[in-house]
């Protein structure tokens, strides 16, 4: 639901005088932590696992790659794959295949410390179409995309949508689950961008639909709830709960992947 | 609902005073009466009645202006006084039971003190601790944002009370959460006391007589929340003349009408208020689809049946509307209604029976192309209360009674093209309480107020209750409709004592246990209308708080200056939070995501007042700490609650320049709220993600602000009265941080930028008030 965002919109209307400025703050020392970004999809391999370390807040966004790690993925059919190091902290699979319903076990060892995770690839829900949703606000048309799919009858399906507007990544997290409208045709639109990136006529919008596990849903939904600090609608953010044991950041996700593109016509 | 035998209650009450002085066999009789304002006929609560011939007898009138004193037969002179009124001397000849009516005439004085005491040295004789009463007439001159005088904003200037945020009417008392305040409007609980996302409170100052805040050591007749009681009373209406009151402001306007139904016997008052920011928005092209307003109505009437019976009806209805054309809308509001019956059963026994209804609901509607849905949530109370005051003898005044509330709580339910996948229904709970409390004036020095409350919450049927152990559902209980489930029974002992050391100082000590059966699941720090309430269940146990406080009060210069200090410690059990990443609006069973823990809060409060003279006001200071420890949050370690602030200072000054002009100022300074800033960052999926360490280990920047206001009054008791109020909020335009957020620098995406959002710099306002 976008209600929170819309509430902020109201606040900003109410308070014509609200003002933003860039400030500096004393930031505590950070504990550099291993970050694991591991994905297996239903597309052809190889799949990759990226190992890096977190950095201090005021450092430039250059994340040190971990080159000396050991990464092993096994699945519940007994296939064991020791990943080979490529570059930039990326390790690639050789044997593992992404199959619906299969469970994958990840084991990462960095400097003698072991991190483990597991993820089961959900069955695929087909992305049938993309539609444009037009709604006028204050006399101006706004556009958002409705991904067309039919949620299966059984409860517990989770989806993540990655939206790109003319190849620029929309940083909103679009995380759906079937706590609402289980077993129905989706009518819910994705976020219509943000103040720096909105959808306009003649834009190409690409949407990747992922059927994700409950643990990935929890991770991404938690991220989507983080919004600054303070009495102005702030939350007390924490590192999103993930499925990796051993204290690493990041996520191991086995998920489906399907992408469609739409051109926004004139209305 | 439970019915309790009156005799049983009386017996219970009497058992409390068994150890006090034996009743003298002397030939005693009783004088009782009511104290009222001569001009408006409004009853006066807290008037002090003394007897010239018996120096040790001091009695105060109750909330209906009623008092009773048992005395040996004889001739006496009563002296009745109340701040702002001329003292009245009433000679009586007591041969048998006597009822009198006392009309007090208000002084034509200007210097009205904002935080008012009933008596100049009232602070030294009352047993109550952590209690302040605000009179609406007197807060008019304190500057507030948008020029709308507001009881909730003014109490935030008292020690131990913290604002939930800039301009916000939500508040935290002694480290409690904002749902731990019992806010009563003519006894009816108000579940969300804010309008416009918290910038206004639901209390229209024209309809309000006074408000009393009790910070955790409330007498036993109050219960149901851990941290405080804010008891707001509506005006009764003038029973002599018809009066129109009103105010025109930049943001909102008010109008009220009051007058007699039967002269001197019964009266009514009607008040309404509406904002009109939406009218300005319509005029602007950019915002013409924005809907943004609230309105509220208060109505009250009283009818005197005979000398012994009086009935009061009061009601409130308020609604907020926010929207964007037809595509988005959110509205919420409270409805309350109270019927009260005052009955003087005998010369010594006063009974008030109340039937109370309260309803809070919110509705979010979204129409976005083909998607069209509404989300509704609702909490409804039906409440029956009987409260007896037994004027046993001049030393003992006993209150006892019961309270039964049927709660109906409906969680967020979707309708339209979006529906909950797992059916959700409302739940019922029955909250019962009996209580007894004795105010015992042992001697000139020592006053004790003690008693207890037994509260019970019974889970009621009509839904499936799941039981969880950690993350795992262990079993389910299907309770048939109207069946009773588990009952939580708690004893809440309360005691406060006041020892008057000498003519100018006193020492106080108090302990209270409070129990709370309704819990607010909040998903933001600011009080947001989409907050959800939940009652006790098989997993959720009643919240408990034990508070101990000690205080020392001292008056200077013939009670011109008053200094009050209090130290408190509060321990809290069964505190609630929910797991990260929970969407409480859509989750099938919110109980599966709850976390439980404990809390502690301690602090020192200081309040220095100057009550009399051309310059009046107060300085309040709070030094405090508030922490929570919840399994599953912050590694199970203690962390600062979001409302934790170390220092809080408020200075309020009012200067009466002459009979027409007065100026006032407010200065507030406080440590920033406890917040969580990231300590580091990493990258995932091409996005920057922040890394966090300990919860709420950081601070928002220090908050400070000065407000200033000028009031011009044209007082003319006979005909019209009018006043102009000019105020400036945030005089030196400090950009106080409302929100701090982190993002990739748009100019250099390899850097992180910290953005501070401030809401208001200068907010000027003009209000014109009239009365005729």
Image (cartoon, coloured by chain):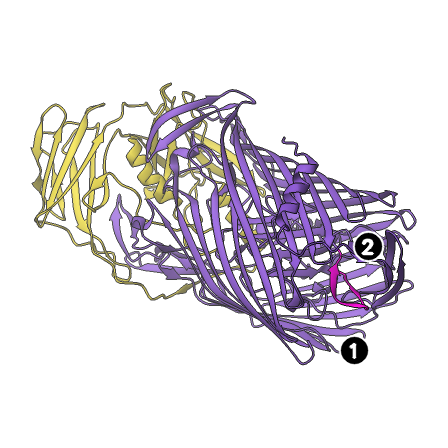
Chain colours: A yellow, B purple
The chain identifier of the residue carrying mark 1 reads B
Which residue in the protein does label 1 denote?
A: B658
Crowding near the residue tagged with mark 1, few <14, some 14–19, many ≥20 C-alpha atoms within 10 Å = few
Q: Secondary structure at mark 1?
A: loop
Q: Residue furthest bottom?
A: B557
Q: Of helix, strand and loop, which one carries label 2?
A: loop
The residues colored magenta run B47-61
Residue B27 percent location from the top left of the image:
82, 54
Dominant secondary structure, magenta: strand
Q: Earlier in the sequence, mark 2 or mark 1?
A: 2
Q: Which residue occupies the foreground of this view, B364 or A135?
A: B364
Residue name at image x 85 percent, y 47 percent: B267
At horizontal 66% and vertical 57% (from top left) the residue drawn is: B21
Q: Is residue B313 magenta?
A: no
Chain holding disc 2: B
Q: Is residue B466 above or below residue B451?
A: above
Q: x, y percentage for residue B638?
A: 34, 54
Magenta-drawn stretch contains B59: yes
- Do dots 2 and 1 share one subunit? yes
**Residue lying furthest front in this view?**
B25
Give A258 or B558, whichever is nearer the viewer: B558
Within 10 Å of disc 2 (Cα), the crowding (few <14, some 14-19, many 20+) is few
Describe residue B474's horizontal placement relative to residue B287 as left or right. left
Location of mark 2 (residue): B27
Q: Nearer the viewer, residue A132 or B291?
A: B291
The label on residue B297 is none
In the picture, the quarter occupied by the N terminus of chain B is: top right
């Amino acid at each position: 639901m976008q209600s929170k965002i819309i509430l902020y919109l109201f606040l900003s209307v109410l308070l014509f005088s609200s003002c933003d400025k860039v400030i500096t703050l004393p930031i505590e020392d950070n504990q550099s932590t291993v970050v694991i970004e591991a994905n297996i999809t239903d597309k052809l391999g190889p799949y990759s696992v990226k190992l890096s370390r977190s950095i201090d807040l005021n450092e430039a966004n250059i994340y040190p790659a971990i080159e000396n790690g050991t990464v092993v993925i096994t699945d519940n059919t007994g296939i064991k794959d020791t990943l080979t190091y490529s570059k930039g902290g990326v390790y690639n699979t050789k044997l593992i295949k992404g199959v619906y319903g299969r469970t994958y076990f990840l084991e990462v060892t960095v400097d003698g410390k072991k991190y483990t995770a597991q993820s089961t690839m959900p069955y695929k829900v087909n992305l049938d179409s993309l539609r444009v949703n037009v709604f006028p606000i204050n006399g101006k048309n706004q556009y958002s995309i409705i991904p067309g799919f039919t949620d299966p009858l059984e409860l517990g399906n989770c989806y993540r949508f990655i939206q790109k507007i003319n190849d620029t990544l929309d940083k909103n997290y679009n995380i759906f689950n079937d706590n609402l409208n289980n077993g129905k045709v989706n009518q819910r639109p994705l976020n219509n961008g943000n103040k720096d990136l909105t959808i306009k006529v003649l834009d190409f919008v690409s949407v990747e639909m992922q059927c994700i596990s409950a643990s990935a849903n929890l991770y991404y939904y938690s991220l989507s709830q983080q919004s600054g600090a303070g009495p102005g609608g702030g939350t007390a953010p924490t590192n999103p709960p993930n499925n990796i044991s051993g204290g690493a950041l990041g996520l191991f996700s086995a998920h489906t992947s399907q992408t469609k593109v739409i051109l926004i016509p004139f209305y | 609902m439970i019915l309790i035998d009156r005799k049983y209650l009386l017996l219970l009450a009497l058992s409390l005073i068994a150890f006090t002085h034996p009743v003298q066999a002397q030939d005693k009789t009783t004088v009782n009466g009511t104290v009222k304002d001569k001009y408006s006929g409004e009853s006066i609560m807290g008037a002090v009645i003394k007897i010239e011939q018996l120096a040790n007898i001091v009695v105060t009138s109750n909330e209906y202006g009623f008092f009773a004193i048992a005395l040996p037969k004889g001739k006496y002179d009563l002296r009745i006084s109340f701040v702002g009124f001329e003292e009245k001397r009433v000679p009586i000849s007591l041969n048998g039971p006597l009822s009198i009516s006392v009309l007090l005439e208000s002084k034509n004085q200007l210097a009205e003190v904002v935080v008012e005491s009933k008596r100049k040295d009232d602070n030294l004789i009352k047993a109550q601790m952590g209690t302040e009463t605000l009179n609406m007439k007197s807060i008019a001159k304190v500057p507030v944002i948008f020029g709308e005088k507001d009881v909730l904003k003014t109490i935030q200037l008292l020690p131990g009370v913290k604002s939930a945020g800039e301009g916000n009417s939500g508040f935290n008392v002694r480290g409690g959460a904002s749902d731990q305040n019992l806010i009563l409007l003519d006894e009816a609980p108000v579940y969300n006391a804010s309008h416009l996302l918290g910038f206004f409170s639901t209390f229209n100052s024209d309809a309000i007589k006074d408000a009393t805040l009790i910070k955790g050591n409330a007498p036993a007749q109050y219960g149901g929340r851990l941290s405080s009681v804010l008891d707001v009373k509506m005006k009764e209406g003038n029973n002599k003349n018809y009066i129109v009151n009103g105010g025109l402001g930049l943001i909102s306007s008010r109008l009220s009408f009051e007058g007699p139904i039967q002269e001197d016997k019964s009266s009514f008052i009607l008040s309404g208020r509406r904002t009109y920011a939406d009218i300005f928005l319509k005029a602007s092209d950019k915002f013409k689809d924005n809907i943004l307003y609230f309105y509220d109505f208060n109505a009250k009437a009283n009818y005197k049946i005979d000398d012994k019976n009086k009935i009061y009806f009061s009601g409130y209805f308020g609604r907020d509307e926010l929207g964007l054309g037809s595509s988005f809308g959110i509205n919420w509001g409270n409805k309350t209604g109270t019927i009260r019956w005052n009955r003087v059963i005998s010369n010594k026994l006063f009974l008030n029976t109340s039937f109370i209804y309260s309803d809070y609901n919110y509705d979010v509607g979204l129409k976005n192309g083909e998607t069209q849905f509404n989300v509704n949530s609702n909490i409804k109370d039906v409440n029956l209360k009987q409260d007896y005051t037994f004027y046993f003898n001049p030393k003992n005044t006993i209150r006892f009674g019961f309270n039964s509330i049927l709660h109906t709580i409906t969680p967020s339910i979707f309708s339209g093209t979006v529906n909950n996948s797992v059916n959700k229904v409302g739940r019922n709970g029955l909250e019962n309480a009996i209580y007894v409390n004795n105010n015992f004036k042992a001697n000139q020095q020592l006053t004790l107020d003690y008693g207890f409350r037994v509260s019970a919450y019974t889970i009621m049927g009509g839904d499936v209750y799941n039981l969880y152990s950690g993350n795992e559902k262990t079993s389910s209980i299907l309770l048939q409709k109207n069946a009773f489930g588990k009952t939580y029974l708690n004893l809440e002992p309360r005691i406060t004592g006041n020892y008057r050391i000498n003519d100018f100082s006193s020492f106080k000590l108090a302990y209270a246990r409070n129990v709370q059966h309704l819990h607010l699941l909040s998903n933001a720090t600011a009080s947001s209308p989409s907050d959800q309430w939940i009652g006790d269940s098989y997993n959720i146990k009643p919240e408990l708080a034990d508070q101990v406080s000690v205080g020392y009060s001292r008056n200077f210069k013939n009670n011109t200056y008053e200094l009050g200090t209090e130290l408190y410690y509060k321990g809290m059990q069964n505190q609630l939070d929910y797991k990260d990443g929970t969407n409480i609006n859509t989750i099938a069973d919110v109980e599966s995501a709850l976390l439980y823990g404990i809390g502690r809060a301690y602090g020192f409060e200081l309040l220095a007042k100057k009550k009399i003279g051309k310059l009046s006001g107060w300085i309040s200071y709070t030094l405090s700490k508030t922490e929570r420890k919840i399994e599953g949050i912050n590694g199970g370690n203690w962390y600062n609650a979001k409302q934790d602030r170390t220092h809080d200072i408020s200075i309020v000054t009012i200067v009466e320049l002459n009979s027409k002009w007065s100026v006032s100022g407010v200065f507030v300074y406080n440590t920033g709220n406890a917040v969580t800033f990231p300590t580091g960052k990493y990258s995932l999926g091409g996005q920057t993600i922040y890394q966090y360490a300990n919860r709420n280990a950081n601070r928002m920047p220090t908050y400070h602000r000065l407000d200033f206001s000028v009031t011009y009054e044209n007082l003319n008791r006979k005909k019209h009265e009018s006043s102009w109020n000019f105020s400036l909020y945030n005089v030196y335009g400090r950009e106080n941080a409302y929100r701090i957020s982190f993002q990739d620098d748009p100019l250099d995406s390899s850097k992180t930028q910290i953005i501070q959002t401030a809401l208001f710099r200068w907010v000027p306002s003009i209000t014109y008030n009239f009365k005729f």
